[in-house]
Image (cartoon, helix red, strand yellow):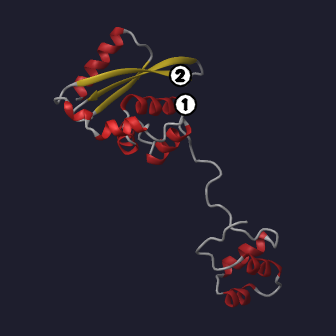
């Protein structure tokens, strides 16, 4: 059974009556205390379709690329940040991803909730044990992703976190060589 929208001015029975009626639109609008647009809408739908439709879009206007999804997931796993903190960090590097998009990605990948152990750990304040300037650096392997020119190749997410301020710097690189790590660390130090 379908539930009726709480703000609905008409019931399914009234909608069927509207759809079947031959009276003028204005007369029906006055009788049922609704607008003429509502009368036209239910007449157009017909007597068979008198239930409320979902207002949810059938397709999202855009979706995150595989690389963006992998970055969000790797960053969540590397930092253990809660959703709002993660969204704050991600929005600096991927500004078109809002909180809802980040949440959808995490939920689809099974990372929507922090495991209870990480939740307890976050509350205990492990980041505050360090002095300002202590930088934790991590390299996460991203899955093979298709580049703009169509080739599939492995990419790496470099993450640097100041453990005291929780300031994050990240970059996606093509390799995990020592030269790339040193270059990233220099970028991170300049950014901090």
Quick one: 78 or 91, which is closer to the camera? Answer: 78
Image height of 103 relative to 144, above or below: below
Quick one: 103 or 112, which is closer to the camera? Answer: 112
Report the residue at 34% width, 9% height from top. Answer: 178
Give the tally of numbered discs.
2
Report the residue at 28% width, 23% height from top. Answer: 136
Point out the image quarter for the N terminus: bottom right
Report the residue at 77% width, 75% height from top. Answer: 43
Counting from the top left corner in percent of width and height, residue 49 is at 78, 68
Q: Which corner quadrant of the image does residue 36 belong to?
A: bottom right
Counting from the top left corner in percent of width and height, residue 32 is at 68, 87
Quick one: 185 or 106, which is closer to the camera? Answer: 106
> Which residue is identified by label 1?
66
Q: Which corner quadrant of the image does residue 132 belong to?
A: top left
| Circle 1 crowding by C-alpha within 10 Å: few under 14, some 14–19, many from 20 | some
Point out the image quarter for the C terminus: top left
Q: Is residue 8 left or right of residue 167?
A: right
| C-alpha span from label 1 to label 2 | 9 Å
User: Tag on residue 85?
Assistant: none
Counting from the top left corner in percent of width and height, residue 172 is at 42, 23
| Circle 2 crowding by C-alpha within 10 Å: few under 14, some 14–19, many from 20 | some
Q: Is residue 39 left or right of residue 76?
A: right
Mark in the foreground, 1 or 2: 2
The kind of secondary structure element at disc 1 is helix
Counting from the top left corner in percent of width and height, residue 141 is at 46, 20
> Which residue is identified by label 2?
143
User: Marks 2 and 1: in contact by CB < 8 Å?
Assistant: yes
């Amino acid at each position: 059974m379908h539930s009726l929208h709480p703000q609905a001015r008409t019931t399914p029975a009234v909608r069927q009556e509207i759809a079947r009626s031959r009276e003028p639109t204005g007369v029906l609008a006055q009788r049922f205390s609704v607008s003429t647009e509502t009368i036209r809408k239910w007449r157009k739908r017909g007597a068979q379709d008198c239930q409320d439709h979902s207002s949810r879009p059938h397709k999202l206007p855009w979706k995150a690329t595989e690389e963006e999804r992998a970055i969000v997931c790797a960053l969540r796993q590397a930092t253990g940040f809660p959703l709002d903190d993660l969204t704050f960090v991600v929005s600096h590097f991927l500004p078109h991803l809002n909180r809802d998009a980040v949440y959808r990605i995490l939920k689809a990948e099974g990372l929507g909730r922090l495991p209870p152990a990480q939740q307890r750990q976050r509350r205990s304040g492990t980041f505050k044990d360090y002095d300002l300037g202590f930088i934790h650096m991590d390299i996460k392997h991203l899955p093979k992703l298709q580049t703009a020119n169509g080739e599939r190749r492995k990419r790496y997410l470099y993450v640097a976190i100041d453990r005291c301020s929780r300031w994050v710097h990240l970059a996606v690189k093509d390799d995990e060589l020592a030269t790339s790590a040193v270059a990233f660390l220099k970028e991170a130090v300049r950014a901090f």
